[in-house]
Image: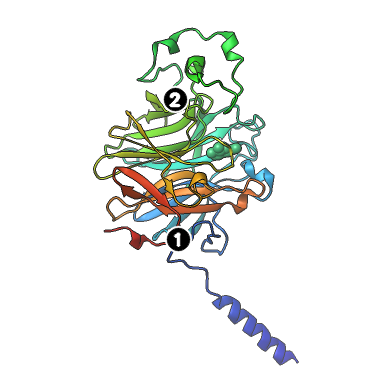
Amino acid sequence: MKRITIFTLGLILLFSCNTPKTSYNVFNPGQEWKDNNDVHINAHGGGILFFNQTYYWYGEHKVEGKIGNTAQVGVHVYSSKDLYNWKDEGIALPVDSIDSNSDISKGCILERPKVIYNEKTKKFVMWFHLEIKSQGYASARSGVAVADNPTGPFIFIESVRPNKGTWPVNVQEYHKLPVSNTVKSNYCGGKGCLPAHVDSLNILGRDFKNGQMARDMNLFVDDDGKAYHLYSSEENSTLHIAELSDDYLSHSGRYARFFSNRYMEAPTIMKTSKGKYYFIASDCTGWSPNAARSASADDIFGPWTELGNPCVGPDSSTTFHSQSTYILPVQGKNDAFIFMADRWTPENPIDGRYIWLPIHLVNDKIELKWMDKWDLSIFKE
Ligand code: GAL
């Protein structure tokens, strides 16, 4: 009897030690995606940094249930050499669970974290969309944190309303006129509650003194090392593209406004070897997916030309049930870009899925097509 038990135990042990970990050699958009511990990757609204031959994926760590739509843990980071298989590297930036007065106190809303590396300071700089705890989406701030290593720990520096007291390079004269109180009372903070002539409401002018609203965002480092912060501003109605300071820790004050009254959210950007910039964003419908938008420009400060919905085929009107979060340049290949998006599950955010699809450059436009499975061989060398 004893012998059998020991034998059985031995078998169980042998079997569990030898259970192969899930490993991938393809992308499976929309499916569960397991990390090195066989746990679904928890890095939503994410972005990727390539450093020292390694990719680092940063994203919102979500927990189960609706409370997971607020930040209970912080920013999660994973590493990978091949983009298919990801190692859990832990929490790069934890929320503050001790100081309830901290801007990033547990229960705040911390979304769309992105990390870039500063060659001059040798620091890793993270920016994210921050909503102070218990204020819904009213604060519309940007948080910044810094680290000596890609996996952190990131130290939170501050949160700001960008470009306080500075006009954009393409400011209009009417922006500088005093903002009347009647006009002020028309703002209610979302799409559908602003009239079509939103431009004349002069939200830019309203926020000039205290800094511009900044919600959905991204970062982009150009070939010359200059970094840019793209964010949905002016009650989400207008996108701002703002240059960061040389250390990437603040805004230089040089910025411009684009796509006025187009409610571009979830902005993402890429640059081809020919020097052309492409932009993909969503419409503004909260967690529900909508049709993506795209645009191109020869200069990051415009003019930007809208190119329409980049998605083709079935489910193109909902971006394949997802919303953009980042455009990932594949290293070692020419003009190879991956569109990264989130399929949100706001009832149980931890279960959100990732949609990664190759970006096709077709006749000066970009195209996204659904694929159940694909791998990097789709890109030419
Ligand atoms: C989306 C946005 C998400 C999140 C959500 C909240 O439009 O892209 O990042 O803020 O709204 O409803």
Q: CA distance from mark 1 to mark 2?
A: 36 Å
Foreground: 210 or 123? Answer: 210
* Colour setting: rainbow
Residue 47, image x, y percentages: 45, 46
Give the residue type at disc 2.
Ser
* 306 relative position to 236: left or right: left
Which quarter of the figure has residue 228? Answer: top left
- Residue 248 in view, yes or no: no
Q: Earlier in the sequence, mark 1 or mark 2?
A: 1
Which quarter of the figure has residue 18? Answer: bottom right
Residue 216, image x, y percentages: 50, 35
Dot 2: within a 10 Å radius of its alpha carbon, few (fewer than 14), some, or many (20 or more) residues?
A: some
Identify the residue position indicated by label 2 in the image: 260
Give the residue type at disc 1.
Phe
Q: Is residue 347 above or below residue 212?
A: below
Foreground: 331 or 193? Answer: 193
SS type, badge 2? loop
Q: Report the residue at 39% width, 14% height from top.
A: 172
Foreground: 36 or 173? Answer: 173
Residue 70, image x, y percentages: 63, 40
Q: Quadrant of the C terminus?
A: bottom left
Q: Is residue 327 above or below residue 298?
A: below
* 99 relative position to 339: left or right: right
Identify the residue position indicated by label 1 in the image: 27
Q: Is residue 208 above or below residue 65?
A: above
Q: Quadrant of the N terminus?
A: bottom right
Front tag of 1 and 2: 2
Residue 22, image x, y percentages: 52, 68
Q: Report the residue at 34% width, 38% height from top.
A: 121
